[in-house]
Amino acid sequence: MKEKILHSNRNGFAMLAVWILLYLAAIPVAIIGANTTPLLLILGVLWLCIGWIPFLGFKVLGPQEALVLTLFGNYVGTLKDAGFYWVNPFCVGVNPAANTHLGQSGDVDGSKNRGLTISTTLGGQSTQTELSGKKISLKIMTLSNAKQKVNDVLGNPVEIGVAVMWRVVDTAEAVFTVDNYKEYLSLQSDAAVRNIVKLYPYDMASNVDTTGDGQADDGSLRGSTETVANRIKEEIQNKVKEAGIEIIDARITYLAYAPEIAASMLQRQQASALIDARKMIVDGAVGMVELALEKLKDDGVVDLDEERKAAMVSNLLVVLCGNHDAQPIVNSGSLY
């Protein structure tokens, strides 16, 4: 069902003046009818009894708000621009997600946007039942569901949290296509996060294809957060497009290994970093030893045989690669 915007009903002030004048006119009509014609008396009294009904058709909309109207179950149209409107008083505003407040910002839940509300307490929890006020917010809202525990492509449990920026673009589809568009968005967001996260390793891993082209790549959750977030956004948009919702952006707000393996993975990362550091130190030390031997030979400082070169290389590597400062031993005798 496509959205139908009502433009010709922004006549609230004119209709307010008309209905007030008609209601006030019923008083002298009843008085005149009491002295002259009983028919005028009946009409005047009847209008005084039911003349308040047209006043139920007045609607006020603020910026970035919409109201979906139905008349006896049939979709009439949507009021979407800010203003003072008058519609058929028997039209009813429809918003199945009016009382749904997820972990998000931007819900139309201020007192000025709500109708009569009854608060009750049951089991120590306060609940609110909204009797009127079915406005739909057209603002950009942020949905931040609870963190999820998902296994990555290698089977490691990962905790991830995603914030989704969204807004309603088609009020008719949002109201009539799904039962509750806010809950629908929340569930589809969780499903999309699971579908995308399981395609990536947490850290860069070999022989892993994250793009689906059959070739191994270097994609990872930690190193490709922008790519992962964009894929999550596209996945959610494909699911909620039929509900009249547009996904503006998606961002990863939390990413970590699950607590049960976090310590082990930290040790693994530390070991990997230590190996890389040692490799760099050894490469540098070998280069320095080679340079020292060449310098001694070119300057003719000392002529060493292969055995003495091996001993010198061993000593220099111990000094350059050791974790502690070397303790030199002075040899006052002959090298031979």
Image (spheres, rainbow, N blue to C red):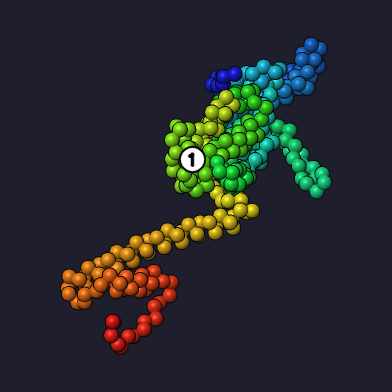
In the image, taking residue 114 as reference, residue 272 lies left or right, namely left
Residue occupying the point 61% across, 35% down? 191
Q: Position of residue 241 (x, y in %)?
A: 55, 27
Residue occupying the point 63% across, 23% down? 177
Find residue 2 and report its image quarter.
Answer: top right
Question: What amino acid does circle 1 point to?
Answer: Val
Given residues 100 and 119, the one toward you in this image is 100
Quarter that holds the C terminus = bottom left
Residue occupying the point 43% across, 40% down? 217
In the image, taking residue 324 as reference, residue 233 lies left or right, namely right
Residue positioned most to the left: 299
* Neighbours of disc 1 within 10 Å: few (<14), some (14-19), many (20+): many
For mark 1, what is the residue? 208
Q: Position of residue 200 (x, y in %)?
A: 52, 41
Q: Position of residue 286 (x, y in %)?
A: 32, 64
- Marker count (numbered): 1
Is residue 267 among what the camera can see? Answer: yes
- Badge 1 marks a residue whose secondary structure is loop
Is residue 63 among what the camera can see? Answer: no
Given residues 213 and 62, the one toward you in this image is 213
Given residues 51 and 134, the one toward you in this image is 134
Find residue 29 and report its image quarter.
Answer: top right
Residue occupying the point 59% across, 18% down? 1
Q: Is residue 113 above or below residue 278?
A: above
Q: Is residue 256 above or below residue 21?
A: below
Q: Position of residue 146 (x, y in %)?
A: 63, 45
In the image, taking residue 94 as reference, residue 167 lies left or right, namely left
Q: Is residue 19 above or below residue 300?
A: above
Given residues 235 and 274, the one toward you in this image is 274
